[in-house]
Amino acid sequence: MLEIVDINCDMGEAFGRWRIGDADDASLMGLISSANIAAGFHAGDPNLMDETVRLAVAHGVGIGAHPGYNDLQGFGRRKIDGTARELVNDIIYQVGAIREFARRHGARLQHIKPHGALYMEMAVNPELARIFIDYLRSVAPDTPVFCMGGSVTYTAAVEAGQPAIREFYADRDYNDAGSIVFTRDAGRPNPAAIASKVLRACNQGKVRTVSGNDIDIAFESICFHSDTLGALDIVRTMREALVADNIRIAPVSEIISLKSTRGEQS
């Protein structure tokens, strides 16, 4: 049973006058503890990055870089062929942008979380995961990577000694292998159903798959998406349910510190 958990959300996912979803970042920011900020390739532009980082700092929310495939038209949800080194160089370029905006506002980069199809590719691509983790070990050895437990990314991080935060996807379905079912349109989920799903995962370590089976799930952070329709109602309902069940919402740094004290793997 979890006593403490992080809530993360993908933020700054717009471009110029283009917007997606029905919730604005300013409304969501006060309800989360970690923000994954789009870094320009799948969404985001310099002005939006600056504004989103400023909002995160104002609300005491952990700042994460959210690098994706170079795919503005497809919102980073289409796989782009490239060598592992080319893709990691794209990640480095994007992480640098968010890191500098964080420094501008007197903050630090809390974590890195690849976006969309790049996240899913890294989860099954050992070479990409290894080169990405090698990059983190060389320049940011204390910066956690957000990933799915059981993924190749998580395995590479653990083997290299890189901090890793496992995610539970509140507004996505799972398959029997423990991976999320990648979708381009999640529709408008029922907030109460999502809250119930999250509480069960926190209390029992179980999630129901699309096949109707229960599987074990372990995590330190709960993810939902700002572009999911009804995102504001989802996070409000989910947060209220967690608080009512005495599950504390806390920043990643506190969770990692607690796990270290207990001798648990980060």
Image: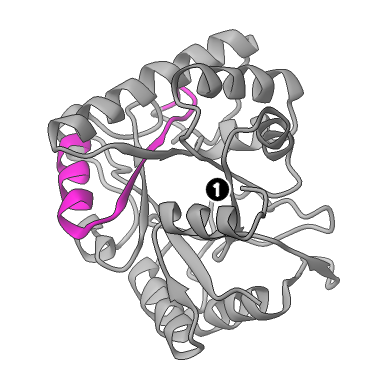
Residue 223 as seen in the image, left or right of residue 55 = right
Q: Residues within 10 Å of mark 1 (few under 14, many from 20)?
A: few
Which residue: 28% across, 34% down? 44
Q: Residue at x 67, y 34 (%)?
A: 153
What color scheme is it? one colour
Classify residue 11 as left or right of residue 139.
left
Question: Is 59 in the magenta?
Answer: yes
The residue identified by callout 1 is: 184
Q: Nearer the viewer, residue 80 or 256?
A: 256
**Percent position (x, y) of residue 233?**
36, 76
Q: Amino acid at mark 1?
A: Arg
Which of the pair 15/11 is nearer the observer?
11
Residue 159, quarter of picture = top right
Q: Based on the picture, tell me whether residue 139 belongs to the magenta stretch.
A: no
Q: Residue at x 51, y 84 (%)?
A: 192
Please provide the residue range marked out in magenta.
49-71
The answer to whether residue 179 of the structure is visible from this angle is: yes
State the image coordinates of residue 154 (x, y, percent, origin top left): 68, 39
SS for dot 1: loop
Picture coordinates of residue 67, whole percent (x, y): 43, 30
What x and y, as percent, mark residue 127? 72, 18
Residue 81, placed above or below residue 13? above
Q: Quadrant of the N terminus?
A: bottom right
Residue 82 visible to the viewer: no
Name the quadrant containing residue 43. top left
Q: Residue at x 14, y 31 (%)?
A: 104
List the single residue furthest toward the bottom: 244
Q: Quadrant of residue 239?
A: bottom left
